[in-house]
Image: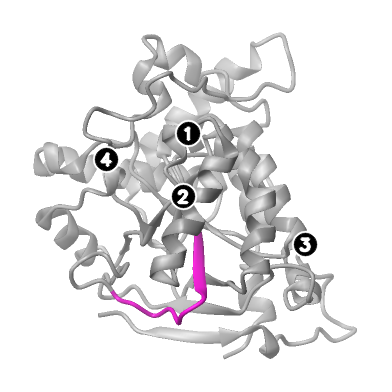
Amino acid sequence: MGSVCLLSCGDISKPSAQEAPPHPAAQVANCATRADVLGLSRIVEVDTSEGPLFGRGQKGGFDFLKDGEIVLTFDDGPSRSHTRNILKALAQHCTKATFFMVGRMAASDPAMVREVATAGHTIGSHTWSHAKLSSLTADKAEEEVELGLSAVATALGAPVAPFFRFPYLRPNAAAVEYLKARHIASFMIDVDSRDFRTRDPAEVQKNVLTQLAGRHRGILLFHDIQPSTANALPALLTELKKRGFKVVHMVPKQTAETLPEYDARAAKLIAHKMQAASKEPLAPRSLTWQQSQQSAGDDGTEVLPWAHQRNTSSQLSTGSTASPTNEPATVPWYKKWFTP
């Protein structure tokens, strides 16, 4: 199992006068331990070389959290209007999260992917189209994993974390072994916000706090395509602070290695979507999904908003107007500002 290196907020190194100006996300150093915000208690640097599995609820899952510690995670985005509100709430509390992005969502709005990264959050992958891997043949499951990873990395313009979450939280043995061979960590959850089942922010907060009352710690699951989470997060983070919970942020020791054939496919897909977006008359455009009246399946599993749309490809073409950045990728902020 991959090793974990623990880093604390107290170990932040100070820049010298000769160093370049700090990355914007490095501002966390100035507020992460303030008494009036949720902040960060520590950063966990993950070695994914052996493809570890995280989450207490999963057999063999690596449990590294202490009572009172939580990890904030968001799936399925980015979705510009909701993701931006979530970023704002996280920034107000000087805290960090991990975003498991769907490849086709990232391909539709590369600028939003970069915005999440610039804010200092960890970016992982969540397949290309949110397919249930256990229902696919091995080659199709591989394609979902690899194209999703390449799409997110290509949209970002830099390597992403080798962090992966199974759609519908449905791992299967073959896919788990494949991810291990690719040196990618798998993340399950301990607390489910169930935000896809409701429009009510209060219900999301109740779901999270009720589960934490019994479990005391864990990896929390939200979806940044859901308005219920975007609206619930400011009050929820404040309440988590009041109840004494502390956020642990997970970062990778090494970045994910993508495969050239999938990188090429991802680049073509993104170029096509950006070309289509440039022809739209209104700016700025955003990719948003209406919440379906039936946001959960008959068996209680998540049903994505685009699963109810007939003309998915045309909706996906209404992504960001921003063209791919020419700016060079920067060293992740935690690599500059945190020392073991």
Q: Position of residue 263 (x, y in %)?
A: 39, 44
Task: From the viewer's side, name the closer residue of 116 and 18.
Answer: 116
Residue that badge 1 annotates = 105
Q: Which mark is residue 24?
A: 3
Q: Earlier in the sequence, mark 2 or mark 3?
A: 3
Image quarter hosting the C terminus: bottom right
Q: Earlier in the sequence, mark 2 or mark 4?
A: 4
Q: Is residue 292 above or below residue 47?
A: above
**Discs 1, 2 touching: Cβ within 8 Å:** no
Q: Three-letter amino acid code at disc 3?
A: Pro
Q: Three-letter amino acid code at disc 1?
A: Met
**Discs 3, 1 touching: Cβ within 8 Å:** no
Residue at 77% x, 57% y: name it: 92
Image quarter hosting the N terminus: bottom left
Residue that badge 4 annotates = 144
Q: Is residue 17 magenta?
A: no
Residue that badge 2 annotates = 207
Residue at 52% x, 35% y: name it: 225
Q: Is residue 70 magenta?
A: yes
Residue at 82% x, 79% y: name it: 19
Would residue 122 be found to the left or right of residue 183 on screen? right
Front label number (2 vs 4): 2
Q: Is residue 195 above or below residue 59?
A: above
Residues drawn in magenta: 62-72
Residue at 71% x, 8% y: name it: 281
Whole-number angstrom distance, CA of label 1 to CA of label 4: 13 Å
Q: Position of residue 242 (x, y in %)?
A: 68, 68
